[in-house]
Amino acid sequence: MCIACRSRLPQNNLIRLKQVNNHIVRYDGIGRSFYLCDECSTNEKKIKGLIKRFKENEERLVELLKELKKNG
Ligand SMILES: [Zn+2]
């Protein structure tokens, strides 16, 4: 389930992430993870919501999402 829009989608349509020390990073198999769908990862409003929720830096998060999408 996408944490931003709560859509239930197949896992291959979701980006798997986790939070470490107030930063959102790509999930590496350790700890708790959460998912973000493709649509929300490019939706400015949803990204802004995540920034507030996780107290993340906007540029950093946008860059990370771009990179993860590029790499599949
Ligand atoms: Zn979503």
Image (cartoon, helix red, strand yellow):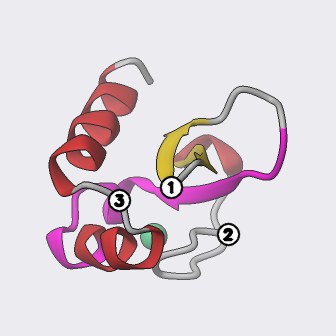
- Indicate yes or no: mark 1 CB to ligand 1 under 8 Å: no
N-terminal label among 2 and 1 = 2
The residue indicated by pointer 2 is: 1
Residue occupying the point 84% across, 43% down: 31
Q: CA distance from mark 2 to mark 3?
A: 21 Å
Residue occupying the point 47% across, 58% down: 37
Would you say residue 32 sits in the magenta stretch? Answer: yes
* Along the viewing direction, whichever of 45 and 56 lies nearer the viewer: 56
- The reply to whether the C-beta atoms of the residues labelled 2 and 3 are less than 8 Å apart is no
Q: For mark 1, give the secondary structure.
A: loop
Q: Quadrant of the C terminus?
A: top left
Magenta segment boundaries in residue numbering:
31-46
Amino acid residing under circle 1:
Asn
Mark 2 is surrounded, within 10 Å at the Cα level, by few (under 14), some (14 to 19) or many (20 or more) other residues, namely some
Q: CA distance from mark 1 to mark 3?
A: 6 Å
- Indicate yes or no: mark 2 CB to ligand 1 under 8 Å: no
The residue indicated by pointer 3 is: 56
Q: How many marks?
A: 3
> Residue 11, how many percent across, how many down?
69, 48
Q: CA distance from mark 2 to mark 1?
A: 21 Å
Amino acid residing under circle 3:
Glu
Residue occupying the point 22% across, 36% down: 63
The residue indicated by pointer 1 is: 22
